Amino acid sequence: MRLPVLRRDDVSHYLRRRSSVPAWLDLTFRVLLILGLISFVLLFHWLYRDGLRDNLDNKISFIDVLYFTTVTVTTVGYGDIVPVSPEARLFETFIVTPIRLFVWLLFLGTAYSFFIRKSLYRWRMARIQNMLQDHILVAGFGISGSEAVNEMIARDIPPAKIVVIDPSPSRLEEAEKLGCNVLRGDATRDRTLSDARISRARSIMISAGRDDTSILITLTARHLSPHAPISVVVRNEDNEMLARQAGATTVINPVSFTGLLLAGSNAGAHIADYIADLASSAGRVQLNERPVTLDEIGKRLTDIRTGLGVRVYRGGKPHSFAEEAAQKLEAGDILIEILASGPSAPVRPE
């Protein structure tokens, strides 16, 4: 089931900027506008009170005019005071009726802007938050973040399991088109990450575009989620250690990775192509990480039948398929294997 869109604020499709008018001044203006319209109708009714008739005592006092004005502006009247002259009836038809409709629209618009919309937002926000569980949190939907989301969707991860946080409405619109949940806000703030239910997230991906911002988000995320894996993109090699100290599980430097591809292409014309193949869901082969299964314990890494075993992690330390540690798999090992893509690919173990 697709989750509804998670937003901290409404994202308009039109060019806009933040209003310089505070909320209390906007509300005051609306109240004064309504009072001004009522005063205008009251003045006309008082000046032309001879065109009105009171069915109770046939006398029109100022209180009667005030009562008739408020009743006709807010409702269609009760019939105790009625216009009898042609001028009064024309005024009620062409002036008071449009004013009545306008006043009601002001009432409804004010109620929606200041009360109903906030209540609906809180209700919808709470509903979405309750449904978020075991999701992937993506902080930053720039080039790297958007490519990561597209790749995850290509790998059959449901978009409803992805929450994108970004301050840009246009970027969030693109993420929303993919079917992701979106949250407009600053990911360096505790409240923003808490609203995205970071404590329930399966993993966290951070690509804020600036190393200092990405590291600050990593610190905040690790504080709120002590155990979730955190992957962060940094572009300066000097910041890789800072990112790890901030709590990142995986640090990715796209500049260094590009250098590796260039160096690989120099060693062979097809090496860079194969590395890209491994990293992409559209390639002929894919890398897969999984825990060792019970029936694989005691076997060699090269003997696994689900794919081509290339590395085993034991106690957090990597061992290649040629090392002694990979000659006998143990409980708790994490395997890295190369799988074939397409219909002929073997079934991955659960």
Image: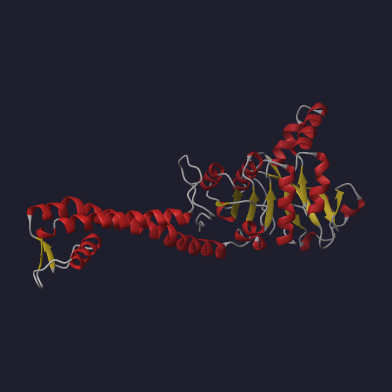
Q: Residue at coordinates 48% horizontally, 60% vertically from top-left?
A: 121
**Residue sitting at the far bottom:** 56
Could you tell me residue 187's position as x and y percent? Answer: 65, 52
**Residue sitting at the far right:** 324
Q: Residue at coordinates 83% horizontally, 28% vertically from top-left?
A: 267
Image quarter where the C terminus lies is bottom right
Left/right placement of residue 225 relative to residue 88 reads: right
Q: Residue at coordinates 78% horizontally, 58% vertically from top-left?
A: 292
Nearer to the camera, 342 or 109: 109
Q: Vertical placement of 310 versus 194: above or below? A: above
Could you tell me residue 125's position as x and y percent? Answer: 52, 61
Where on the picture, by quarter, is residue 240? top right
Q: Vertical placement of 258 versus 248: above or below? A: above
Q: Can residue 310 be seen in this view?
A: no
Where on the picture, by quarter, is residue 129? bottom right
Nearer to the camera, 318 or 176: 176
Nearer to the camera, 155 or 41: 41
Left/right placement of residue 322 relative to residue 195 reads: right
